[in-house]
Image (cartoon, grey):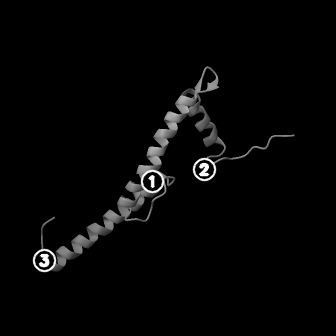
Amino acid sequence: MKKKNVTVGLLGGKEMNESKEFWKDIIYKDGKLDEEAILKELSDYYMVIQEVPKVYVHITGGLMSKIFYEAQVVIDEYERILDRDYVYKDDVRDLLGDERE
């Protein structure tokens, strides 16, 4: 039976090959999977999936919480919020006649 080429997760093609190459020296020892190394990496990943959403929720005003957003998407939303808040502050200063920055 011919083995199917299945894309797993969010990566496909070139990205999947880059991912395999990246992990090769980290999770293999003497040509075999190193269970201890895998558990260490999974532990680190667990921390990331617990903590990153908290940052995303905070800086995007609750609009984003998933860790799989591309960085630029989160940065753009954060900057949009900063710009909006800056404009609001300017509007309030104008209304109050406050010249402070």
Q: Quadrant of residue 64?
A: bottom left
Residue depicted at x 66% and y 43%: 13
Q: Would residue 26 appear left or right of 83 to someone viewing this image?
A: right
Residue 10 tag number: 2
Q: Quadrant of residue 99?
A: bottom left
Measured in 3D between alpha carbons, the distance from the residue under mark 1 to the one under mark 2, in whole angstroms, is 17 Å
* Above or below, comparing residue 73 to residue 41 in the picture: below
In this rendered view, identify the residue nearer to me: 43 or 12.
Answer: 43
On the image, numbered disc 1 is attached to which residue?
72
* Above or below, comparing residue 85 to residue 39 in the picture: below
Which of discs 1 and 2 lies nearer the camera? The answer is 2
In this rendered view, identify the residue nearer to me: 61 or 42.
Answer: 42
Which of discs 3 and 2 lies nearer the camera? The answer is 2
The three-letter code of the residue at mark 1 reads Gln
The three-letter code of the residue at mark 3 reads Gly
The three-letter code of the residue at mark 2 reads Leu
> How far from the left and from the top, in percent, is residue 37?
53, 30
> How far from the left and from the top, in percent, is residue 24?
59, 29
Q: Secondary structure at mark 3?
A: loop
Q: Earlier in the sequence, mark 3 or mark 2?
A: 2
* Above or below, comparing residue 33 to residue 75 in the picture: above
* Above or below, comparing residue 87 to residue 13 in the picture: below
Position of the C terminus, as image quadrant, is bottom left
In this rendered view, identify the residue nearer to me: 37 or 73.
Answer: 37
> How far from the left and from the top, in percent, is residue 3?
80, 40
Residue depicted at x 50% and y 36%: 41
Position of the N terminus, as image quadrant, is top right
On the image, numbered disc 3 is attached to which residue?
97
Residue depicted at x 35% and y 60%: 58
